[in-house]
Image: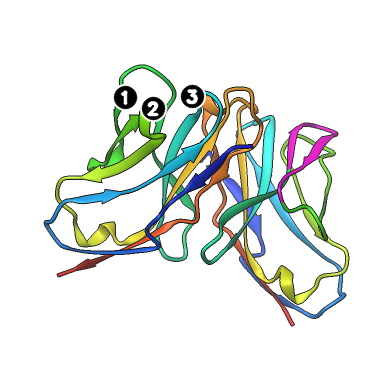
Amino acid sequence: AQSVTQPDIHITVSEGASLELRCNYSYGATPYLFWYVQSPGQGLQLLLKYFSGDTLVQGIKGFEAEFKRSQSSFNLRKPSVHWSDAAEYFCAVVGKAGNMLTFGGGTRLMVKP
Amino acid sequence: EAQVTQNPRYLITVTGKKLTVTCSQNMNHEYMSWYRQDPGLGLRQIYYSMNVEVTDKGDVPEGYKVSRKEKRNFPLILESPSPNQTSLYFCASSLSGRPNYGYTFGSGTRLTVV
């Protein structure tokens, strides 16, 4: 069965600082990987996804993520955080033949002025 | 505008009173799914549907029912709600069950069962 772990429940960074949110997955083969963002009171918005090819993927809002097969990780990064990035971030995985998108527990990001 | 619409956005009900949360999409998507979101647990899939009249259980189906009589609608039914079903619910759809098409989420329904 596939699973996703986001080790950090809360992260606080200063505005302008760099950000890295961790995601580890468990799956027998290379899965499809996603990062979603949820702003307060909102639904989920897709930031980026990885299917195959280049292991560094670019997303919206200046985010990027790197797939590392050897570490079963798909960490999300941003070079300079803005106050509007404060939200909850979810990593998700689905197998190539799968019908279920499995989410991690989420990481809540707070941004200090 | 392409979207997934859930209703209601907020619902407070009493234990045992049957309720339905509606979900409708206007993108002609084949795949639809229901998730519940609880603090620290992320989103867990309740049921999904690959197409009309095809539904299957997700990770946490107990206490829920669904139906898919037409492509655009996928209602979530709680026959006898209990307080442990207090949660934030999301409906999602995808062009097919294949993940590369991506998932579009509704804005959520916050349900409180007292």
Q: Residue furthest top?
A: A53
Residue B88 or B95: which is nearer the viewer? B88
Read off the residue under disc 2.
Answer: A69
Say if A46 sits above or below B39 in the image. above
Given the image, on which type of amino acid does mark 1 rest? Thr
Q: Is label 1 in a helix, a strand or a loop?
A: loop
* Neighbourhood count class around disc 3 (C-alpha, 10 Å): few under 14, some 14–19, many 20 upward: some
Most extreme residue toward the front is: A70
Are the residues flagged by discs 1 and 3 in contact, CB closer than 8 Å? no
> What span is in magenta?
B48-59
Badge 2: chain ID: A
Of circles 1 and 2, the one toward us is 2
Ranked by sequence position, the earlier of labels 1 and 3 is 3
Kind of residue indicated by mark 3? Thr
Q: Residue at x 41, y 34 (%)?
A: A72
Identify which residue is drawn at 72% across, 38% down: B72
Label 1 marks which chain's residue? Answer: A
User: Contact, CB < 8 Å: mark 1 with mark 2?
Assistant: yes
Q: Could you say which quadrant of the image residue A24 lies in?
A: top left
Disc 2 crowd rating (10 Å Cα; few below 14, some 14-19, many 20+) is few
Real-space CA distance between mark 1 and mark 3, rounded to the nearest whole angstrom:
12 Å
Ranked by sequence position, the earlier of labels 3 and 2 is 3
Residue at which label 1 appears? A55
Q: Are marks 3 and 2 in contact (CB under 8 Å)?
A: yes
Which residue is tagged 3?
A30
Give x and y (percent) for residue A104: 50, 50
Amino acid type indicated by mark 2: Arg
Helix, strand or loop: magenta stretch: strand
